[in-house]
């Protein structure tokens, strides 16, 4: 199972939203696929995020997500954020 997530700010009063792309790969029977979908939908983080934003899900054919040219990088994202100095006092 591979999951990719992107975030979009809503425009002009629309709710923000996450797009979740789910790839189920391998020789899985219907019961196994249903179990994985159930687990993905029970994720407590997703439930919390879903309070303030919509979560849209789409599925794609199996392909290594790391091979995509627009792969997100945690370190690249952090470098773009302005992180203010916070004084502990």
Image (cartoon, helix red, strand yellow):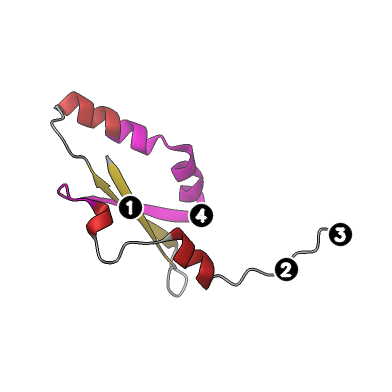
Does 52 lie within the magenta span? yes
Locate residue 70, reporting x and y percent. Answer: 29, 66
- The reply, left or right, for residue 28 in relation to residue 21 is left
Q: Tell me the quarter of the picture where residue 87 sits.
A: bottom right
Q: Is residue 86 above or below residue 1?
A: below
Q: Tell me the quarter of the picture where residue 10 sits.
A: bottom left
Q: Of helix, strand and loop, which one carries label 2?
A: loop
Give whichever of 54, 24 is nearer the camera.
24
For discs 1 and 4, the disc positioned in front in the rendered view: 1
| Contact (Cβ within 8 Å) of mark 4 with mark 3 | no
Q: Is residue 83 above or below residue 6?
A: below
Spatial CA distance of label 1 from label 4 is 19 Å
Please identify the quadrant where the C terminus is shown.
bottom right
Number of other residues with Cα within 10 Å of mark 4, as a class: few under 14, some 14 to 19, many 20 or more:
few
Spatial CA distance of label 2 from label 4 is 27 Å
Please identify the quadrant where the N terminus is shown.
top left
Q: First in sequence: mark 2 or mark 1? A: 1
Locate residue 18, reporting x and y percent. Answer: 39, 57
Q: Which residue is mark 1?
A: 4
Q: Which residue is mark 4?
A: 52
Spatial CA distance of label 4 from label 3 is 31 Å
Q: Which residue is mark 3?
A: 89
Which label was assigned to residue 85?
A: 2
Q: Of helix, strand and loop, which one carries label 1?
A: strand
């Amino acid at each position: 199972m591979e999951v990719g997530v992107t975030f979009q700010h809503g425009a002009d009063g629309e709710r923000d939203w996450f797009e979740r792309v789910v790839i189920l790969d391998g020789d899985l029977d219907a019961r196994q696929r249903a179990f994985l979908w159930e687990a993905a939908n029970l994720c407590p983080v997703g439930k919390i995020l879903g309070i303030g934003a919509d979560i849209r899900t789409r599925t794609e054919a199996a392909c290594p997500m790391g091979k995509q040219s627009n792969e997100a990088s945690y370190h690249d994202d952090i470098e773009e954020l302005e992180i203010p100095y916070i004084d502990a006092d």
